[in-house]
């Protein structure tokens, strides 16, 4: 039932963005019709042409035929008025149409003509867009050398024009080229550069696109943890910003990650999400081929051979249509496995031969392209070096000017030295004054801290000790004055005993805290038995627990040894047990446990008490907070105990924290070093 609900919610999240995308296209169509219906409408007007350009772009990955027809109109009108920008945009869009249709021989001349015109009008933005598209198309064909050459040229232009967005995209293209060659090390080096640029840009959509491609890289490298993290981040961003073509790709990559791990049901779920976007008018045959073959592999893994066959054949036909060599290899391999499992040996052999033939061809091409990739990079570096050398010659001509400038600078330096000497003297005096001011400020801060300590000390004595002592004094006076009988006095003895024990406990904490505030306590760690400390404190507090019918259970492992100061840890255990009794209702349970974790003992004191909310949990360990609370039987404390526990644990190289749920109970945790044979030192 939960799976169906998640599936339904995901459908809503997909169909709603698609409506928004169609609304944008419809809005452009409406504006175009409105413009064409005006009396002064001129189809050759640049406003009309620019509107057509935007409309053509809105059909990218939605309706390839509409992209073509509108682009041809843009080209026709632009040529009539010699509007070069319109011609560039139209040619680039037509190049995309032919490329998406698998007619690469027709597409590349369009891009090359568009690039030439963009250079003529010195429109670097258009030039970079065309270079990026051509580089990606060459990469898809497996012509990595030409793709790398275009990307490197584009990077130089992007740096000159300070275009960080295109700089990010072009570096990511190069990372993709290395990823195609399974050179993950160099790919990650370029992705590191891309992410640094993305941080400068601060655009979450660009960052999400990079994360999608990184996820695919990590999937190929079998690093599924990083792959899943990156793809989930990108999906969230694409859904929020309604980027549907990238969302379809991201869903497909997530399916691939699960497929690589043979988690077929989850893979199928995400492939279905991607497929839904394609059915709702997104057209990108390259990604669709990967999707179809992925679904075919999933159904093969689920032993649903008929469905696997349908998807694999559809993927193979689409691969042949757009001349995708990798798509034909992948789909042929899946079809071979299907026919082999069904013992259809003739068909299996035919697909195996196709797979082997195409794989061998691609392997040779990849080896050749790897060498071309290196040669292109070296050639590009050589060209840059030649440019540097020519710059050196130009710089040599300017040396005379530099020498003259040095003489002027030398004279100015002498003047500056005189001024600086005077400034240095003044700076020294200012520094001495600043140091003295700082010393006064530090002394003032120390005095303020001493005042706070004194105020807190008198507050505790005034409120938490004077009350019980005053009550004891009043009771004794009533007895000595004869106002109460001996039997009545004896009936108060349990209360007197509890008050005296509370006073003793409070005084012990108060003295320890006071010594800490005055830096008078020195931690002296040694090898001690944790079990002995716990048992002693359970015995000490048994009577108090018995009065509330609370059961205390020691669940420590056999004889755990710790390296700590015995007196300080005794204070920690006693305070935590006392607190647990205080805040646990009658008939409750308190357990003490310990676990070994990386050279430390993690000790826990759990109760079934009243618990505490998140706000109190944040404050209870703060030194500046004096929280005095009342127990289930109105027991009162000083608020010093937990602050003292924190100091004691930290002095023994440990940590302390709390987990609590109101009305269910509280668990205090603290860690202490395990005792070892070698010498250990406390902080």
Image: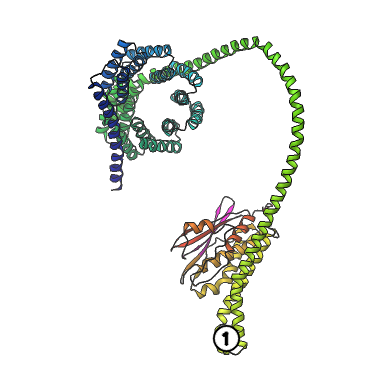
* Residue 607 inside the magenta-drawn segment: yes
Between 436 and 594, the one nearer to me in the picture: 436
Q: Which residues are magenta?
A: 591-611
Q: Position of residue 341 (x, y in %)?
A: 29, 31
Q: Is residue 659 magenta?
A: no
Horizontal and vertical percent for residue 244? 33, 32
Quadrant of res 427: top right
Q: How is the image coloured?
A: rainbow
Element type at marker 1? helix
- Drawn side of residue 89 relative to residue 471, left or right: left
* Residue 329 position by quadrant: top left
Residue under the point 51% across and 74% down: 546
Locate residue 571, reporting x and y percent.
62, 64
- As drawn, 661 above or below 285: below
Q: Nearer the viewer, residue 190 or 426?
A: 426
Name the chief secondary structure element in magenta: strand
Q: Is residue 308 left or right of residue 216?
A: left
Does residue 497 appear anywhere in the picture?
Answer: yes
Residue 389, percent from left and from top:
60, 11
Left or right: 364, with 519 as reference point? left
* Number of numbered callouts drawn: 1
Q: Which residue is mark 1?
A: 489
Q: Is residue 342 at all visible to an observer of this figure?
A: no
């Amino acid at each position: 039932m939960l799976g169906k609900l998640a599936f339904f919610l995901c459908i809503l999240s997909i169909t709603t963005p698609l409506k928004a995308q169609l609304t944008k296209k419809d809005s452009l169509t409406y504006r175009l019709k409105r413009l064409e219906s005006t009396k002064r409408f001129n189809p050759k007007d640049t406003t009309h042409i620019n509107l057509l350009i935007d409309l053509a772009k809105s059909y990218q990955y939605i309706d390839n035929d509409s992209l073509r027809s509108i682009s041809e109109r843009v080209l026709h009108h632009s040529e009539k008025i010699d509007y070069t920008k319109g011609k560039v945009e139209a040619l680039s869009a037509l190049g995309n149409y032919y490329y998406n249709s698998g007619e690469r021989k027709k597409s590349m001349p369009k891009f090359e003509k568009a690039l030439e015109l963009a250079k003529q009008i010195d429109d670097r933005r258009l030039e970079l867009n065309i270079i990026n598209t051509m580089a990606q198309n060459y990469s898809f064909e497996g012509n990595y050398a030409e793709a790398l050459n275009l990307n490197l040229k584009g990077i130089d232009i992007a740096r000159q024009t300070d275009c960080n967005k295109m700089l990010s995209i072009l570096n990511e293209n190069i990372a993709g080229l290395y990823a195609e060659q399974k050179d993950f090390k160099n790919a990650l080096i370029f992705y590191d550069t891309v992410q640094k640029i993305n941080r400068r840009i601060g655009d979450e959509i660009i960052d999400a696109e990079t994360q999608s491609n990184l996820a695919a890289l990590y999937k190929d490298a079998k690093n599924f943890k990083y792959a899943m993290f990156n793809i989930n981040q990108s999906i969230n961003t694409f859904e929020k910003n309604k980027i549907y073509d990238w969302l379809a790709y991201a869903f497909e990559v997530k399916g691939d990650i699960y497929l690589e791990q043979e988690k077929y049901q989850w893979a199928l779920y995400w492939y279905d999400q991607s497929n839904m976007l394609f059915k709702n008018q997104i057209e990108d045959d390259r990604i669709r081929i990967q999707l179809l073959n992925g679904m075919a592999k999933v159904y093969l893994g689920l032993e649903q051979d008929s469905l696997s066959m349908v998807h694999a054949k559809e993927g193979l036909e689409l691969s042949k249509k757009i001349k995708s060599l990798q798509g034909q290899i992948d789909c042929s391999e899946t079809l071979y496995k299907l026919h082999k499992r069904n013992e259809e040996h003739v068909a299996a052999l035919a697909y195996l031969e196709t797979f082997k033939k195409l794989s061998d061809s691609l392997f040779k091409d990849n080896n050749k392209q790897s060498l071309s990739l290196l040669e292109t990079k070296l050639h590009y570096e050589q060209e840059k070096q030649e440019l540097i050398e020519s710059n050196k010659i130009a710089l040599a001509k300017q040396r005379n000017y530099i020498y003259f400038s040095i003489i002027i600078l030398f004279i100015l330096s002498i003047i500056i030295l005189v001024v600086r000497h005077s400034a240095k003297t003044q700076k020294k005096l200012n520094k001495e004054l600043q140091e003295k001011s700082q010393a006064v400020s530090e002394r003032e801060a120390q005095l303020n801290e001493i005042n706070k300590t004194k105020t807190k000390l008198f507050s505790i004595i005034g409120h938490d000790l004077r009350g019980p002592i005053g009550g004891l004094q009043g009771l004794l006076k009533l007895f000595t004055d004869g106002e109460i009988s001996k039997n009545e006095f004896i009936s108060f003895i349990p209360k007197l005993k509890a008050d005296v024990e509370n006073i003793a406990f409070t005084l012990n904490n108060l003295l320890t805290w006071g010594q800490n505030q005055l830096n008078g306590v020195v931690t002296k760690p040694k090898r001690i038995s944790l079990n002995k400390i716990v048992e002693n404190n359970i015995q000490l507090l048994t009577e108090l627990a018995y009065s509330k019918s609370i059961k205390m259970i020691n669940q420590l492992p056999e004889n755990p040894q710790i390296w700590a100061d015995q007196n300080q840890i005794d204070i920690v255990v006693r305070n935590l047990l006392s607190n647990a009794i205080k805040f646990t209702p009658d008939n409750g349970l308190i357990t003490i446990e310990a676990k070994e974790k990386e050279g430390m003992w993690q000790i826990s004191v759990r109760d079934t008490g009243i618990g505490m909310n998140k706000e109190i949990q944040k404050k209870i360990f703060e030194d500046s907070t004096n929280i005095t609370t009342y127990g289930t039987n109105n027991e009162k404390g000083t608020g010093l105990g937990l602050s003292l526990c924190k100091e004691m644990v930290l002095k023994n190289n440990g940590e302390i924290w709390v987990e609590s749920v109101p009305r269910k109970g509280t668990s205090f945790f603290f860690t202490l070093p395990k005792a070892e044979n070698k010498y250990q030192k406390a902080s």
